[in-house]
Image (cartoon, coloured by chain):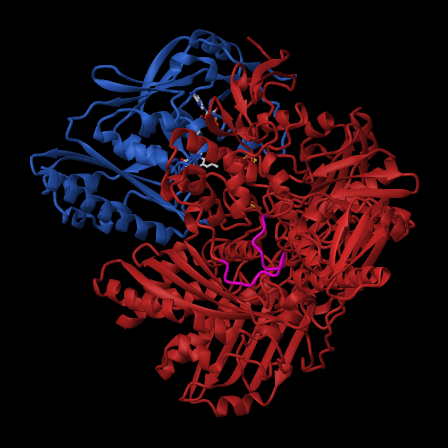
């Protein structure tokens, strides 16, 4: 008979993990689909009894998104504009049922190349807090995600929070997703953008692309090209093939060809940036 | 803190409950099996379909992804909790009124998602409603009537009772709500997986992981002995009769369980039977089977290649069937043409994706076998199962459960012979429910087509010649491949008059899932080609595409490609004319929009269709019976299976008018082979036409019998009351005492049946003859926006005009049209089954709430004298013109001709780039 642990506090959970390998369970929206027609006989550590892990808190220098925070919690939270893109991503995850159960942390831990949470978290330079019985460590999201379905998580650790450093109030963000139908769709390409304005120009641009490489990738060359540019509808013109092609390694699959992914990425980047440039420029 | 052994306490629909299932058990499973709350449906166990949606502390979640442990101490509301004191809630009543439930399998999930929305937002917009319900898939309705119902109950959109532009008699023509609708809304409806006797064992099929190869089984007896809960592992050797099935009387070629050789991935190999826990604990890898994979035959090119491996011994060259329709002199036809257009097209495997996976159960009663199953074809199931078990047909009884969608995919056998074999040999009831991946891997598909076609016309725009060849990938077994090969050449020209025709087809055997029946039998594929050619020719002639079609449209008195002269009911031109005003407005609007430039382009396209009702040049009779009991209960013994399309409503409507009683008086017994006569299969758009006519004959015959008994004239009014019938004819009044009459086995004292077999004539070697007694006609107009930089196509509006002969129930007809449009849109833009790659509803995309645009339906009634009150079929007709209209709209917007369905964004973008590049060189 398999084990099913559902502690109500973190210490117990970490203690259990120290003793034996367990499969961690949160919203179950990746766990159950992976076991259709197969026995549910994993030894499980269900985190959902740990109330302290759910919710979003202002911790001074950063926002703390507890590991059990669902997509819907995020959508409903009162957060600054730099989270708008992440919220838009949350609204695009599956349908409302998925948003009510699935967690951001689970999305990162599952480490799908098409994880919709990853681009904006990467662009926000979020960190993942990993806790074990013997201590806590933090890793940038981009280091936490190590490959297609692999992460830096050790077997005795759980993710306890995603930490988002605060940005100036004027920082804006966006999320663009390309899929072949309206709801319940895995992204062919998705893009997360965070822009910190400096007067009428780009002070700091951070851009990440998902589903075009094993993990979400930032685009440093493009970010550099954007910094200092005026915030207007011409912002997208900074996008060039070279700034993107050196970083991304898309593949052919049933959802799209590699060439198409690259091509669509360029279009979406141009549109997303010009749109933001126009919006922020008009507001400034 | 290990809660593996404790019971989970929670509240379900306001009452305390305790669940004993292990804590990791899916809540959906526990609600169904422990609490008997089978209103919560399971379509995928993976979050993809939303059929299992329940409210957890008032928020919608998929109960298939909530472990029982997480429901501890919480409030669960299921569909059973919506109705209060057995009265439908306003929301349920609105669903019923609007026809928002067809088969009803998605309905509980839809209702729960809608409840969640309305509790939070009492007056949502259409967009908000779609966002809230977007996590539930429906394969039947096209979602429009669901949105209408939700907005109606919210008061955001008044109950705009759709305008009835048809003449109601009494029941025929009336928008009565689906007569079997209420249980679909309360969760009481029993589908294939919803019931089995408590002592039933569970059957699980072990399937081939390879597309082609050989296998050996190891020591199965030892395997079984090591597992006390396992009662049997059945193999091909256990089949007492013939281990071959297929829809045609001859050429049955598909094994129930493969015998050493497998021909497609997903083919059934072994059946393990045991108690549910023991079976659930198994993994396929546990079974002692060794596989020897061989290079599969892939695609029609693979099948036709010289030196190709042979899929089935005895079918040399991998050819399953060929079809041919030749008329006139094709060379002369092209010689007379001033313009010629041609091209090649490809389509993909398309999955039926009914939300209810195959399910059923069987039990042995003495020397008889009773099978309860979700099916489209009870009599065929009966006869085929008898052959497989080597017993008499009369020893098998099929009792259909409610059918949660079929679309052609539940015509072929699935669980029937397996549960039958197990129950027959073990002597205990046995149930089986396919998982979603199993359903997708094993069931039949729409044939992928590779089409080459050309057409010619005069400078004035009159068609002179049409030549077509379609190669169809029929997969590993015959299934309905020969039907597709026959049907396509008859229809491939489209509903137009062409003097010189040469249409040929070939169905090929490959190592893919068998392609079978899917709404349209190949015609949706061929229509993509012929409707594109029409547009191309119209362009060359400089004639408006709609005018070009009207010029060539087939009308009464015209001759088809098969040499059949249409004598009645040919309302195609009316359909095109009905689109004219929208066409003019939308084309002008598109021009205005496109003048602005930018990446978003508007396109407006049109396509016509025709489709023969009933089997091609084959007898396909229906018999229906109506009885009246001594108590005065009128019963329709209705063998026409309802898979959501409506025979449980339409047949009583027809019976009511034929007999002359109100429709509420009629009880409906659906498709039990012991109680209903053979009404054939629910396929080929034949039930309304064929079984409907049989119902009319039965009703009229019974009425005539009653009038004769009472000795009153034909105009007499009937009032069937408690134990008697009162007849009034002018001033005369007669009473028949029913209680004094002799009862038959059903307890009826008066009964009559009606049989109708649509008259057809065989086709000769050139496909000339009378393949169908009547045809349905239609035309769709599609308005699309295409993003030329991203290759995405968004359909903005569909106007669908159909000649249905007579609209028996306009609400149900609109539902069929909406559903057909949705499936046509899926075929055009997103649906592609790739064996081993898209075997779930995550990777295989069907349209969601947000993908279906507003659909205007226009019903044309050009009565068919053979049909019941003039009616003919709609089921398949509705799907055929959608994809070609969308592709023609894309061409209008961009000048680019899409040749590969589905037009996924990458294919569209690549086609656009190819044209741009060609333009630059
Ligand atoms: C129908 C459907 C549609 C979907 N659509 C989308 C979509 O559009 N975009 C998208 O990105 N995703 C989508 N998903 C995937 C899924 O919903 C998300 O990845 C979700 O956020 C996962 O969170 P969860 O809490 O449900 O994870 P779970 O299933 O509970 O866990 C996922 C994995 O993460 C591990 N894990 C979870 N939490 C922790 C933790 N705190 N510490 C350590 N390990 C942990 C688990 O062990 C498991 O391996 C969809 C899923 C479904 C079923
Ligand atoms: S059964 Fe739960 S989403 Fe399909
Ligand atoms: S009514 Fe929605 S799936 Fe049949």
Left or right, residue B587 beside residue B244: left
Q: Is residue B569 left or right of residue B882?
A: right
- Main secondary structure found in the magenta portion: loop
In the rendered image, residue B600, in percent from the top left (x then y), is placed at 28, 58
What percent of the width, then of the height, locates residue B379? 79, 54
Of B90 and B236, nearer the camera is B90
Count of numbered tags: 0
Q: Residue furthest left?
A: A199
Q: Is residue A226 visible?
A: yes
Q: Which portion, as a residue range, is magenta?
A: B164-177
What quarter of the picture does the C terminus of chain B occupy?
A: bottom left
Please identify which colour was used for chain B in the image.
Answer: red
Q: Where is residue B109 in the image (x, y as percent from the top left)?
A: 53, 36
Residue B171 within the segment the image draws in magenta: yes
User: Which residue, as the protein is rendered here, is positioned at the far front?
Assistant: B731
Q: In this view, does B387 lie to the left or right of B1?
A: right
Choose top left, top right, bottom left or bottom right for residue B793. bottom left
- Residue A181 in sight in this render: no
Query: Ligand 1 lies in which image quarter?
Result: top left
For image coordinates 56% across by 19% down, the residue present is: B14
- Which quarter of the picture shows residue B484? bottom right
In the picture, which chain is blue? A
Q: Position of residue B249 (x, y in %)?
A: 80, 63
Whether B399 is drawn above or below B173: the answer is above
Quarter the N terminus of chain B occupies: top right
The front one of B284 and B777 is B777
Q: Which of B340 and A218 is in front in this view?
A: B340
């Amino acid at each position: 008979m398999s084990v099913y642990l559902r502690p109500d506090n973190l210490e117990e959970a970490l203690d259990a993990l120290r003793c034996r390998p367990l499969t961690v369970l949160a919203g179950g929206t990746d766990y159950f689909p992976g076991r259709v027609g197969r026995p549910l006989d994993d030894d499980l550590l269900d985190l959902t009894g740990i109330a302290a892990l759910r919710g979003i808190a202002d911790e001074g220098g950063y926002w703390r998104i507890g590991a059990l925070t669902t997509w819907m919690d995020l959508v409903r939270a009162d957060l600054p504009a730099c989270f708008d893109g992440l919220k838009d991503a949350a609204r695009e995850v599956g349908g409302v049922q998925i948003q009510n159960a699935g967690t951001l942390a689970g999305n990162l831990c599952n480490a799908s190349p098409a994880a919709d949470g990853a681009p904006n978290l990467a662009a926000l330079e979020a960190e993942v807090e990993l806790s074990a019985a013997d201590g806590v460590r933090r890793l940038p999201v981009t280091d936490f995600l190590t490959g297609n379905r692999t992460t830096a998580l050790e077997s005795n650790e759980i993710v306890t929070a995603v930490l988002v450093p605060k940005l100036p109030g004027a920082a804006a963000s966006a999320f663009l997703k390309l899929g072949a139908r309206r709801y319940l769709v895995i992204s062919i390409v998705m893009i997360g953008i965070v822009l910190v304005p400096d007067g009428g120009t780009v002070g700091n641009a951070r851009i990440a692309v998902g589903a075009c490489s094993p993990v979400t990738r930032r685009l440093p060359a493009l970010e550099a090209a954007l910094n200092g540019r005026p915030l207007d509808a011409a912002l997208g013109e900074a996008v060039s093939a070279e700034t993107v092609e050196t970083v991304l390694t898309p593949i052919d699959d049933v959802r799209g060809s590699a060439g198409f992914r690259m091509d669509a990425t360029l279009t979406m980047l141009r549109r997303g940036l010009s749109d933001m440039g126009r919006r922020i420029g008009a507001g400034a | 803190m290990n809660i593996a052994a404790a019971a989970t306490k929670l509240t379900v629909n306001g009452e305390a409950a305790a669940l004993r299932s292990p804590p990791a058990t899916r809540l959906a499973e526990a609600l169904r099996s422990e609490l008997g709350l089978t209103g919560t449906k399971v379509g995928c166990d993976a979050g993809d379909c939303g059929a299992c949606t329940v409210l957890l502390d008032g928020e919608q979640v998929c109960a298939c992804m909530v472990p029982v442990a997480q429901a501890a101490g919480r409030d669960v509301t299921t569909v059973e909790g919506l109705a209060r004191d057995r009265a439908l809630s306003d929301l349920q009543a609105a669903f019923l009124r609007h026809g928002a439930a067809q088969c009803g399998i998605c309905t509980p999930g839809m209702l729960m998602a809608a409840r969640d929305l309305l509790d939070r937002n009492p007056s949502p917009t259409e967009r908000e409603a779609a966002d809230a319900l977007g996590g539930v898939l429906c394969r039947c309705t096209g979602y429009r009537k669901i949105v209408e119902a939700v907005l109606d109950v919210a008061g955001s959109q008044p109950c705009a009772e759709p305008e009835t532009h048809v003449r109601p008699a009494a029941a025929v023509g009336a928008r009565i709500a689906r007569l079997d609708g209420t249980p679909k809304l309360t969760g009481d409806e029993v589908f294939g997986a919803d019931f089995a006797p408590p002592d039933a064992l569970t059957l699980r099929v072990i399937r081939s992981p390879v597309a082609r190869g050989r296998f050996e089984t190891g020591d199965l007896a030892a395997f079984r002995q090591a597992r006390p809960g396992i009662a049997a592992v059945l193999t091909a050797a256990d089949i007492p009769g013939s281990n071959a099935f297929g829809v045609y009387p001859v050429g049955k070629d598909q094994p129930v369980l493969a015998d050493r050789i497998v021909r497609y991935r997903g083919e059934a190999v072994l059946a393990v039977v045991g108690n549910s826990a023991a079976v659930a604990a198994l993994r396929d890898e546990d079974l002692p089977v060794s596989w020897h994979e061989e290079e599969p035959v892939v695609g029609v090119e693979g099948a036709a290649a010289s030196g190709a491996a042979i899929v089935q011994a005895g079918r040399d060259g991998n050819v399953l069937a060929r079809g041919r329709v030749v008329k006139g002199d094709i060379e002369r036809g092209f010689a007379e043409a001033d313009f010629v257009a041609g091209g090649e097209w490809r389509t993909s495997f398309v999955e039926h994706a009914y939300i209810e996976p195959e399910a059923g159960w069987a039990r042995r009663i003495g020397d008889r076998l009773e099978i309860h199953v979700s099916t489209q074809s009870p009599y065929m199931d009966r006869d085929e199962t008898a052959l497989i078990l080597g017993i008499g047909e009369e020893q098998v009884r099929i009792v259909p459960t409610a059918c949660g969608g079929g679309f052609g995919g539940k015509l072929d056998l699935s669980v029937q012979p397996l549960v039958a074999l197990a129950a027959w040999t073990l002597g205990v009831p046995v149930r089986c429910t396919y998982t979603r991946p199993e359903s997708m891997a094993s069931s039949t598909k729409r044939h992928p087509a590779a089409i080459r076609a050309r057409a010619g016309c005069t400078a004035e725009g009159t068609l002179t010649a049409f030549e077509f060849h379609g190669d169809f990938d029929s997969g590993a077994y015959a299934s309905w491949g020969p039907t597709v090969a026959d049907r396509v050449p008859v229809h491939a020209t489209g509903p137009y008059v062409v003097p010189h025709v040469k249409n040929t087809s070939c169905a090929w055997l490959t190592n893919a899932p068998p392609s079978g029946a899917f709404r349209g039998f190949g015609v949706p594929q061929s229509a993509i080609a012929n409707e594109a050619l029409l547009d191309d020719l119209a362009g060359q002639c400089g004639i408006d595409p709609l005018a070009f079609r009207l010029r060539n449209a087939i009308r009464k008195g015209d001759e088809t490609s098969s040499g059949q002269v249409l004598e009645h009911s040919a309302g195609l031109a009316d359909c095109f004319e009905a689109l004219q005003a929208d066409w003019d407005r939308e084309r002008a609007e598109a021009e205005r929009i496109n003048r602005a430039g930018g990446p978003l382009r508007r396109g407006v396209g049109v396509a016509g269709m025709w489709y023969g009702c009933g089997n091609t040049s084959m007898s396909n009779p229906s018999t229906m019976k109506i009885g009246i009991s001594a108590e005065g209960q009128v019963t329709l013994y209705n063998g026409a299976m309802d898979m959501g399309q409506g025979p449980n409503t339409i047949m009583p409507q027809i019976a009511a008018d034929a007999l002359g009683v109100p429709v509420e008086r009629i009880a409906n017994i659906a498709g039990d082979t012991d109680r209903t006569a053979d009404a054939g299969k629910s396929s080929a758009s034949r039930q309304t036409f064929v079984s409907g006519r049989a119902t009319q004959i039965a009703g009229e015959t019974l009425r005539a019998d009653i009038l004769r008994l009472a000795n009153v004239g034909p105009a007499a009014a009937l009032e069937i009351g408690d134990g008697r019938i009162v007849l009034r004819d002018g001033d005369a009044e007669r009473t028949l005492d029913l209680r004094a009459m002799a009862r038959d086995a059903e307890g009826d004292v008066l009964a009559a049946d009606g049989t109708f077999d649509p008259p057809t004539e065989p086709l000769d070697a050139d496909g000339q003859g009378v393949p169908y007694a009547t045809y349905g006609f239609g035309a769709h107009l599609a308005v699309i926006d295409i993003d030329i930089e991203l290759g995405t196509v968004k359909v903005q509006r569909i106007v669908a005009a159909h000649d249905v002969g007579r609209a028996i129930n306009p609400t149900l007809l609109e539902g069929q049209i909406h559903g057909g449009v949705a499936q046509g849109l899926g075929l055009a833009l997103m649906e592609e089954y790739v064996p081993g790659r898209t075997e779930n509803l995550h990777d295989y995309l069907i349209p969601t709430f947000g993908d279906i645009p507003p659909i205007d339906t226009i019903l044309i009634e050009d009565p068919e004298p053979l049909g019941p009150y003039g009616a003919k079929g709609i089921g398949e007709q509705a799907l055929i013109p959608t994809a070609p209209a969308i592709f023609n709209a894309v061409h209008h917007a961009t000048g680019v001709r899409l040749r590969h369905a589905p037009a996924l964004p990458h294919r569209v973008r690549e086609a656009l780039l190819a044209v741009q590049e060609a333009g630059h060189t």
